[in-house]
Image (tube, rainbow, N blue to C red):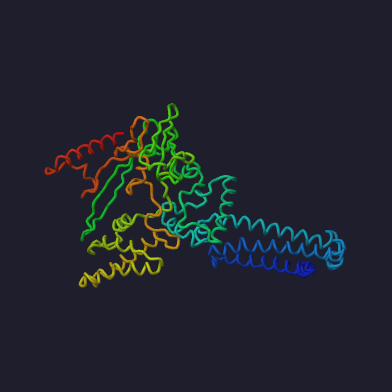
């Protein structure tokens, strides 16, 4: 059998074209089998190897088959013989001999055709499976996607495949994603991509087809307590607390307050933004199902800006949760969070200030940046706290590693990603977010503005206070008049929110 197969394959190589084709098809098939066995065994794990295995080898295999056909066509034209005559001349007699099951030539042809189909079909399925894996998305184009891959692995959605959000369901979505992927390959190959990668991603599937597959729409309600700790820049890095009772809501009757009112099925919110970037809002309109639309226009835009607005957009989850997965941190909040998690020792003097200074150091080369971060922290304690340094050297080294991890997560010089490159619209700490629409500049035809009432979406339990539940505690005797009244007002509002 093996000798017959070898003779059959060898007989296909009738000239230079077909010899080259036979060599390419045979070697690519053998190499594919070898690489696939090593992938299954765990010897090869790189996404680049996957590209070679499922794209390069199959492509060479198809080219080889094509060259074999070209070789036979060239031979036919050169000799003037028919295909039957060429087969009789070049195929060994034993391969053409017939028996009960037909000629060996026919059997070999059918067998190799089946092998070709199985090979190409299996490769297509394995290749599609590989390209759906997050490791492929994040590492196949390492330089381009490294910022997104880094933040993805540290995100709340780290176990959700990229394709679940970026592709979605259905044949149309699959085809669109492959066409988009082809352009991405071209962009990466010829260095045509933008730095940093621009946002928003406008070709994402609607949130109702992606987010709501897991986040059950009927459960968009209830209250949730959120705690924020901000550490001071003083020697002790003194903590100050902000506690908010977030009113989630759903927009449904009886639950028509809170942040998720904006995406409820009964409330259609439509808006248009400058250059369709979803940051500077031109106008926003509420379209109730049983009433007249109510539009607010941004009176704060410079003259001429927004005169030719892009197509309006229906508000959905990602208009606020625009950084649900690829989360780039605010530098101060990043340091505060590491202190809160116990990664930094508060016995180190001015540790918050030193950490903040370290992560704000810039450098074009990542390795140089890591050295600068380490030097900034170590040199400070070695210089200003000579006696303390030997005793707390382990804690200082841990602070260095923490600062380097913060920097490596958020700063990517090769892709020009720095602090603030990707604003987060969840909340309004940086001035955007909610305040894009909830602004005194956003007014209707009567001159009334969109409400900026703080308690629309959250009750304030403490705001930059020394106790996380400050406004729920009894008033202290020395509380001044304005603070006393604010304390009582917020306490009463919290009680109403809990009843609702």
Up the image or down, 35 lies above or below 452; here it is: below
User: Which quadrant, please, contains the N terminus?
Assistant: bottom right
User: Is residue 34 toward the left or the right of residue 77 in the image?
Assistant: left
Q: In terms of image quadrants, where is residue 487?
A: top left
Task: Give the residue displayed 27% in from the left and 34% down from the top.
Answer: 496
Vertical order, 447 against 236 (above or below): above
Which is nearer the eye, 366 or 299? 299
| Residue that appears at 68% across and 63% down | 61
Q: In which quarter of the image is residue 315?
A: top left
Q: Nearer the viewer, residue 244 or 66?
A: 66
Q: In which quarter of the image is the C terminus?
A: top left
Q: Nearer the viewer, residue 420 or 237?
A: 420
Residue 320, position as x, y percentages in the image:
40, 44
Residue 438 coordinates in the image, percent (x, y) = 34, 39
The residue sitting at the left extreme is: 477
Identified at 38% across, 66% down, the residue is: 363
- How far across and down, in percent of the image, does residue 443 sit? 35, 35
């Amino acid at each position: 059998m093996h000798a017959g197969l070898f003779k059959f394959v060898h007989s296909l190589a009738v000239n230079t074209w077909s010899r080259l084709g036979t060599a390419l098809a045979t070697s690519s098939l053998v190499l594919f089998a070898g690489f696939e066995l090593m992938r299954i065994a765990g010897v090869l794990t790189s996404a680049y190897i996957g590209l070679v295995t499922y794209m390069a080898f199959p492509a060479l295999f198809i080219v080889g088959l094509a060259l074999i056909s070209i070789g036979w066509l060239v031979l036919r034209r050169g000799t003037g013989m028919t295909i039957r005559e060429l087969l009789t001349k070049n195929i060994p007699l034993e391969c053409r001999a017939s028996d009960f099951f037909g000629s060996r030539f026919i059997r070999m042809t059918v067998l190799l055709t089946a092998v070709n189909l199985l090979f190409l079909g299996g490769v297509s399925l394995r290749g599609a499976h590989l390209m759906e894996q997050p490791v492929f998305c994040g590492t196949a184009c390492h330089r381009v996607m490294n910022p997104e891959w880094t933040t993805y692995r540290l995100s709340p959605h780290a176990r959700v495949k990229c394709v679940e959000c970026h592709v979605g369901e259905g044949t149309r979505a699959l085809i669109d994603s492959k066409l988009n992927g082809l352009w991405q390959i071209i962009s990466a190959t010829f260095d045509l991509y933008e730095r940093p990668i621009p946002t928003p991603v406008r070709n994402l599937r609607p949130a109702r087809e992606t987010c709501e597959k897991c986040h059950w729409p009927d459960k968009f309600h209830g209250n949730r307590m959120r705690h924020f700790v901000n550490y001071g820049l003083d020697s002790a890095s003194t903590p100050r607390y902000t506690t908010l009772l977030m009113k989630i809501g759903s927009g449904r009757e009886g639950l028509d307050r809170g942040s998720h009112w904006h995406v409820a099925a009964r409330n259609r919110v439509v808006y248009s933004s400058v250059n369709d970037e979803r940051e500077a809002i031109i106008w926003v309109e509420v379209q109730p199902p049983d009433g007249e639309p109510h539009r607010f226009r941004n009176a704060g835009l410079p003259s001429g800006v927004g005169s030719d607005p892009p197509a309006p957009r229906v508000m959905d989850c990602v208009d606020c949760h625009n950084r649900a997965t690829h989360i780039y941190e605010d530098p101060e909040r990043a340091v505060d969070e590491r202190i809160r998690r116990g990664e930094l020792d508060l016995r180190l003097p001015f540790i918050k200030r030193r950490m903040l200074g370290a992560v704000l150091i810039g450098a074009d080369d990542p390795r140089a940046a890591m050295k600068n971060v380490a030097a900034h922290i170590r040199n400070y304690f070695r210089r200003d706290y000579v006696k303390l340094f030997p005793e707390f050297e382990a804690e200082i080294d841990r602070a260095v590693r923490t600062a380097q991890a913060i920097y490596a997560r958020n700063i990517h010089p090769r892709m020009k990603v720095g602090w603030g490159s990707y604003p987060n619209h969840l909340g309004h700490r940086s001035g955007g977010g909610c305040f894009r629409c909830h602004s005194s500049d956003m007014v209707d035809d009567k001159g009334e503005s969109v409400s900026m009432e703080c308690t629309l979406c959250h009750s304030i339990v403490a705001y930059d206070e020394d106790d996380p539940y400050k406004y729920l505690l009894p008033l202290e005797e020395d509380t001044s008049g304005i603070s006393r009244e604010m304390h009582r007002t917020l306490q009463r509002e919290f009680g109403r929110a809990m009843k609702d």
